[in-house]
Amino acid sequence: MKKAGLILAMLMILGWASLSKADPAVNLSGYVLANFQEYLNEEGKYSVVLDGSDWVDQGPKGFNQFDLTRAYLTFSADWNDKLYSNVTTDIKADPDGVRRLFLKFAYVDIKNLWPDSKVRFGLQEVPWGSYDDNMLWRYRMVEQGFYSYWGTFATADYGLSVLGSVFDKKLLYHLAVLNGEGGSGVETDRFKEYVGRLTLDLGSPDTFRIYPSIGYSSHRFNDNDGFIDDVLMTGLGMDFWRIHLAGEYFQGILTMTGGSYPLARGVWPTGAVDALKATAEPEDFLEDDSAVNYGGYAIYTDIKLADKLNLFGRYDRYQPNTDPDLDRLDETMWTAGICYHPYDPLWVTLDYRQNSFGDPDPDNDGQDELPPVSVIYTHWKIVY
């Protein structure tokens, strides 16, 4: 019955659109993100492996590679003054290196049911996604924004949302009810995610502009009312003269099951989490289901040196567990570079990144199994 009702609703929407505008203009757009990366640390692109009874890091020396990370293709259409649709495809690489095409977004917008509003249904971007990438960080070609990079939430999900603005576009809102499994996850009806963002947008981009935001994401579990997966998000961006400054902060609470190692999300070399668990003390594991606190912040800067030439920088600190007894699990990332935009369809960067770990020697054997990862890149964004 649910499927029949959904199909009927979609047919009604398409029928309404076809009656209003028989030949909508379909727009085709997209962009490709590619890079060349050269690892500067001695181990190259390393993994942490068990060698007999000892955990060690190993990897190809002087590792470098050309890589294609994203290839977006977007089909969009304004069917009439009330209805808009968007379908976006992307690629991703499997562990074996094969790149596969998948659906990134597929949604319809019903516009202006009330002034300056949209009601969106389908596979869609989460409320913090484009704000994070476009308004604060601005260099998606280099890396994802802070929240999605550290795995706080998926960048796309199935659901229903409302978005728009009030007070002459000075207050922006985006509220959504989503499956909570992410765009590639399978819906199991364990929970739904309730997530939203409010943004003040004050001033003018030509003189001085400031745009603080607050967001909140909450999963409510059907199978266990005691489980929590909540995140509070804040962000602040400022633009003045040739300078862009921005920052983000989040604080999350995640219920982990008894017996698990209390490490909530993160970005680690292959095998690193296994090494952390294997070398931990028995008392470091959770005896009962427990709410684990995690969080972090990012600081961004962008300086326009000349027309189509910018300097940019970023610093992240992420804590997968804020318990003082586990503070050595902190991770940091910083990156800096220069971006050149010689033509409208082409952006090129030369940038450096270093990821460091709070405890590079988790098993206390005098050898650093988690040395800093240092990489120099050139990134390309090609728009079509």
Image: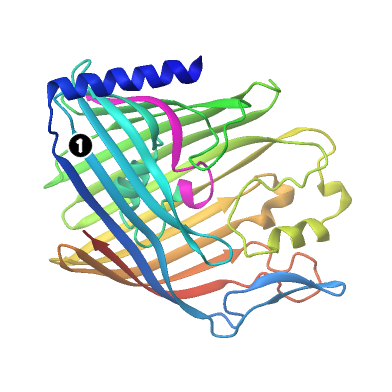
Instruction: Report the side of 66 relative to 211 (left or right).
Output: right
Query: In terms of image quadrants, where is residue 10?
Result: top left
Can residue 39 be seen here? The reply is no
The answer to whether residue 213 is above or below residue 162 is below
Residue type highlighted by circle 1:
Ala
Residue 340 occupies which quadrant of the picture? bottom left
Which coloring applies here? rainbow
Q: Residue at x 12, y 66 (%)?
A: 307
Q: Does dot 1 land on a helix, a strand or a loop? A: strand
User: Depth check: 216 or 236 in front?
Assistant: 216
Q: Position of residue 363 (x, y in %)?
A: 80, 66
Residue 67: x, y in percent? 43, 70
Residue at point 22%, 16% (across, down): 113
| Circle 1 residues within 10 Å: few <14, some 14–19, many ≥20 | some
Which quadrant would residue 163 be assigned to in this image? top left
Q: How many marks?
A: 1
Residue that appears at 74% across and 49% down: 325
Q: Quadrant of the C terminus?
A: bottom left
Q: Which residue is mark 1?
A: 77
- Asked if residue 28 can be seen in this view, the reply is yes
Q: Position of residue 109 (x, y in %)?
A: 27, 27
Residue at position x 76%, y 62% in the image: 275
Residue 80 as seen in the image, left or right of residue 91: left
Q: Is residue 164 magenta?
A: yes
Q: Give the magenta-colored segment's residue range.
A: 147-167
Task: Reply yes or no: does residue 128 show up in magenta.
Answer: no
Is residue 195 or residue 19 the one in the foreground? 19
Percent position of residue 128, x then y: 39, 38
Work out whether 310 lies above or below 378: above
